[in-house]
Image: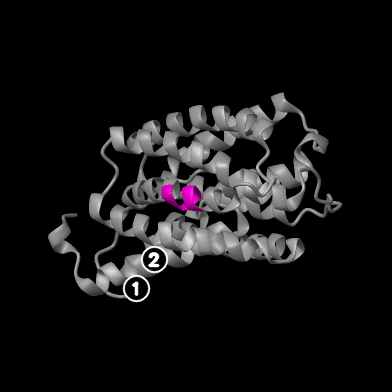
Amino acid sequence: MSGSELTLPFILTLFAIGFAGSFISGMVGIGGSIIKYPMLLYIPPMLGFAAFTAHEVAGISAVQVIFATIGGVWAYRGSGYLNKKLIAAMGLAVLAGSFAGGFGSSGMSELTVNVVYGVLAATAAVMMFIPKKEVPDAREEDVHFSVPLAAVLAFIVGVGAGIVGAAGSFLLVPIMLTVLNIPTRMTIATSLAVTLISSIGSTAGKVFTGQVLLWPSVIMIVASLIAAPLGAKAGQKMNTKILKWLLAVLIAATAVNIWRDLFVQLF
């Protein structure tokens, strides 16, 4: 798609999708691909614009997540919620996994990419609804977790997320909350930093295999830089239980929607 094919209504539609998704991503600590992937896939053709392919949506999402998470991390600087040890442990592993997934996705069919997205979204939804004891806010030095377990899980998430152009935060968040027992607000802030690292690997894999559309990505980037910091500021003022349930409902809704369409395609 060239820049000349982008009409003003189409540009405004893409900006609105990017703004809405990035505001939510900054608020609940995710990169936003779990939300923007179905929005980019379904909303443009619903409004009469040209439809993106699954590979194009994944490419746009991968690039946009970098800037959405930069804005979110910047908003959390100096807050005390960024766990450096966890960022290092999960960041390096998810970077390797996301690059492998992003690079290898070029040889996959659109149906396969959508199935991977559906599996990731469904898994995240189930994990978010698993009851757990609320971990109270704590200082970084008082939070303990298994470094090897965090790294292995991050690598696995990175591979799948790289395929769909995500950064895996919609799975990293429930893993941090449910498996690693990280406090909710620290999870939200730290997951944005890990997601930023992951999105670099995912984007590199997509760019090297020609899956990124320039101008739609630029529009989404601009929207992300404006909306993500606003969402992060709003999230810092909200009750952690509300944030957790908001994220769970969003993930569940997108999982149901994608699987409904997949069943139509498959059967």
Circle count: 2
Q: Secondary structure at mark 2?
A: helix
Q: Where 197 sits versus 63, above or below?
A: above
Q: What secondary structure do most residues of the magenta stretch adopt?
A: helix
| Residue sticking out furthest to the top | 148
Question: Which class describes the residues within 10 Å of circle 1: few (<14), some (14-19), or many (20+)?
Answer: few
Magenta stretch holds residue 177: no
**Image quarter in which the N terminus is found:** bottom left
Pinpoint residue 7: horizontal percent, then vertical percent: 19, 70
Name the residue beneath numbered marker 1: 46
Name the residue beneath numbered marker 2: 42
Question: Which portion, as a residue range, is magenta?
Answer: 67-71
Pinpoint residue 207: horizontal percent, then vertical percent: 30, 37
Q: Secondary structure at mark 1?
A: helix
Q: Residue at x 71, y 28 (%)?
A: 149
93 vs 127, left or right, is left
Residues 134 and 79: in front is: 79
- Marks 2/1 in contact by CB < 8 Å: the verdict is yes
Question: Which class describes the residues within 10 Å of circle 2: few (<14), some (14-19), or many (20+)?
Answer: few
| Kind of residue at badge 1 | Met
Q: Residue at x 57, y 37 (%)?
A: 157
Magenta stretch holds residue 70: yes
187 vs 32, left or right, is right
Pinpoint residue 17: horizontal percent, then vertical percent: 40, 66
Work out whether residue 260 can be spotted: no
Residues 120 and 205: in front is: 205
